[in-house]
Every structure is written in C-alpha cells, then in structure tokens.
Amino acid sequence: MRQVASSTIRRLSLYLQFVEEVEREGKATVSSRELGERGGATPAQVRKDLSFFGSFGKRGIGYPAALLAARLHDILGLRRRHRVVLVGAGRIGSALASYPGFAARGFEIAGIYDADPEKVGRSLDGHVVRSSDRLEADLAAQPADIAVIGTPAVAAQEVADRLVRAGVRALLNFAPLKLVVPAEVAVSNVNMALELEVLTFALSRWRG
Amino acid sequence: MRQVASSTIRRLSLYLQFVEEVEREGKATVSSRELGERGGATPAQVRKDLSFFGSFGKRGIGYPAALLAARLHDILGLRRRHRVVLVGAGRIGSALASYPGFAARGFEIAGIYDADPEKVGRSLDGHVVRSSDRLEADLAAQPADIAVIGTPAVAAQEVADRLVRAGVRALLNFAPLKLVVPAEVAVSNVNMALELEVLTFALSRWRG
DNA sequence: GAGTGTGAAATTGTTCACAGCG
DNA sequence: CGCTGTGAACAATTTCACACTC
C-alpha cells in the first residue's frame, strides 16, 4: 500500500461516528467486528485501516473506545477548528448551515456568500448573506481553509478559481462537474444527480 | 472484470452530463479524450467503461453524441420516469425538492413525509408535507421505487425498514449510518460530515 | 480464548499498447 | 491517419490466514 487510500479515510470517518456512539453508551472497548458491522466493512479491513496509523488495539480485547476516538480525531485532522466559507446561499448552502453535525465536528461558518443581490442581506440560520464581491477582501482579513461550493454549475469553476487564489485549500463541491484545481487543493464532490443515477441503474438491472 | 463496477456507473453518469452539454452545443460527435477530460478519466478508461455495454463509437471519429446520450440514458435506467418519495421535510428534503436536475432527469416527487406534526400540512415547493403515518397506505395505493431518507440518524433505519416493506427498491440515504437492507435493495449514501472529514484529513496531511 | 497486527494471496480496478476500422 | 475496442500488464485494494499477545 503506497499511500493511504481515500476509501480508507472514508471508512475511518464512519468508525469515528460509531466509536463516539459507543462512548456515549459507556462501553470501554470496541472490537474490529463491531466497528465493521456499522460501516459495512469486514473485521480484517477495519484492522488494516487502523493499523496503517499505528497499533492501538489490545489483543483479546479490542480497541479502547476513548483512545480510538482521540486517535481518529487526530488522524482526520479534527483537533483544530476549521473555518468554512459557504458560497451559494441556495438550498444546499442553507441545508449545510443548519446541519447539526457541522458545528459538532468543529466546523465554524465563517461566512455565507451569494451573487444574487436579492439574497444578499438576508439572514440564513443566524448568518447574514454577503455579496460574493466581498469574498476576496473577507478571506484576506480572515482566512478560511475550507469552502463549500453550492452555486449553479456554470459559476462553480470561476468561484473555485477565486477561492483557491484567496488561499482556500479544500473545496466541498456540490456542482455537477469536476473542478480543475492545483494539486495541493483537496476537493470532495457531492453530486445528487449522480447518486440517483446509481440507483436507477441498479433498479433497471434488477428488473431487466 | 466480473460485473460492472460502481465506479464505472458513477463515471457514466458524468459522461451523460457532458454529452448532453455537447449536444446542446450542436456538436455531432465526442471523443473519449473529450469525455474523459470533463470527468477526470483517461481516454482508455472512458473507452473501457463504454465498451462494457457494447461498441457504439466510430473509429477515427469518436462517439455520435445523440446515440451516446440515448445509450447512456438506457444503461442508467433513465428511460422511464421514477416516482420518488421524500421522507424528512427538513433542509435536505427541501433542497432536493427544489433541485432542478431532479425533474430534468425524469424524477417525479410522489410525496414528502415528516413525522413532526409541526411540519405536516405545510407546503414545500408545491408539495404538501404529509404525516409519516400515511407512508404505507400511500405507497400501497401508488408505489414508488425510490425513496430519499433525510430524517435524523436515529429514525433512519426504522424508516428504511418500513419503506422496504412497502416495496421501495432503492434508497438515497442522507443519514450518517449504513442502513441494513436486503440484498435486492440498492442504497446510495450521501454523508456530508464524511466528505468534510476527507477534506480535513487532506488539510492535516498537507500541513503536517 | 478472544481479538489484534500483518505479510502473502486473491481479487478488483486501471492503464498500456496495439490491431483494426472508418 | 485518428480514434475505437480490447486483451494483456500493471497497480491498488480487499481478504485470508495465522502468529502473537492480553
């Protein structure tokens, strides 16, 4: 295994979600089997995933829940708070703004921006929507490392370019196209049309 | 290659998005190179993906845009309209309800449901929110094959069970857990917390 | 005994390279 | 000649199996 696989990271995120639940229930340890059941992974895969970052399990027992949670936070870069800028105050932006898991993981909304003068000035979950024109100035004054792109597809690439130029290093892209960015910028894509089509494909297979 | 890979389907969905754009521009053909640039795939991969479903390209020319679009619709099961039920009238449900790509792809909202009496009766993008209690009765009268689960995590599995029992064969799950469903039911997951954590992981790598 | 950690094997997915057609 | 279609080479990822330790 050359470097850590993105599928591994995605599973780690699920393990974290589960181990936090386990902690809330007061259990002291979790086994790889338990961790895997929740995230749809085999016990062997869980152990491989975790062993990539060290060995913090106890043989015969499992993983100490508190330690595992702490290590996962650490691995996933969740120790520090992250300032997040939302571009596009449409449905997606507002869905994220009010997403409870957002604040819980230490993500702080640094600002919500929209190009539409109609939306500018309105309040969205306690944040006043600002004009996109102010993006560069605001980011220069108070940098953010993550931006969420919830604009229409036609605007997405230009917004991405501006964000990257302003120093944003990670983009969560909801527009249905692949953004072109420098190699050092991380991009995650959420494409609902695509997910629905994975489903219609499966449906058509089943029925012939 | 035993059976078609899910990554292949996801790319096909991107190719469709692009070929439709190409059609609108009036171009008659697209090459594998052009198709790949948009979706971040190599020309060879595009050809492999498509060749899995037959050979409809023209050597020396590329793929006829209209034919390719038609075949992709066909492969992805988009020829027929799909009735979609939305459970959970929160931000996610409303984001999807007003998502333009939704109707454009032949997805028809069959109903929006919520367990919260506060929300029942309100109108959401032209659809009156109904009580979750009516789910079974409504689905018996008018079946749907896809359901979107936008409920809180604690309710998601129970909602999934009820939907599956009522005949739904495909689930788009926004709750941050892996649903347990029979093998013949397709599930796609959208997990924003997870996508954000993929980004924070990448950020922490970069900075050390 | 139960459950981790990990090389080695199996599988799955991607890229290469080139024959063959329009 | 350009670009598809595809077997064969390669690379990545998952699973297996078992030594080891608590």
Image: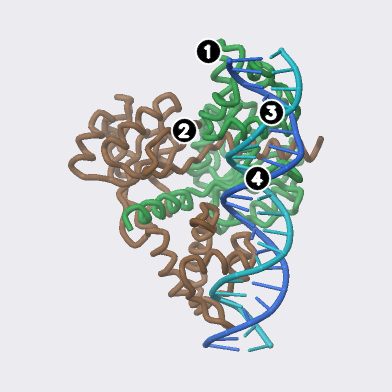
Chain colours: A green, B brown, C blue, D cyan
Along the line of sight, which residue is nearer the eye, A13 or A47?
A47
**Mark 4 crowd level (few <14, some 14–19, many ≥20, 10 Å Cα):** many
* Residue B109 vertical placement versus A78 (above, below): below
**Mark 2 crowd level (few <14, some 14–19, many ≥20, 10 Å Cα):** many
Q: In the rendered image, is residue B192 in sight?
A: yes
Q: Secondary structure at mark 1?
A: loop
Residue B122 on image: x %, y %: 30, 33
Label 4 marks a residue whose chain is A
Give residue A9's mark: none
Q: In the rendered image, is residue A134 in sight?
A: no
Q: CA distance from mark 1 to mark 4?
A: 34 Å
User: Where does label 3 land, which residue?
Assistant: A78
Q: Secondary structure at mark 2?
A: loop
Q: Are marks 2 and 3 in contact (CB under 8 Å)?
A: no
* Residue B136 vertical placement versus B21 (above, below): above
Q: Same subunit under labels 4 and 2? A: no
Label 1 marks a residue whose chain is A
Q: Quadrant of residue A61?
A: top right
User: Where does label 2 land, which residue?
Assistant: B175
Front: mark 4 or 2: 2
User: Where does label 4 land, which residue?
Assistant: A171
| N-terminal-most mark, 1 or 4 | 1
At label 4, which amino acid type do we have?
A: Leu
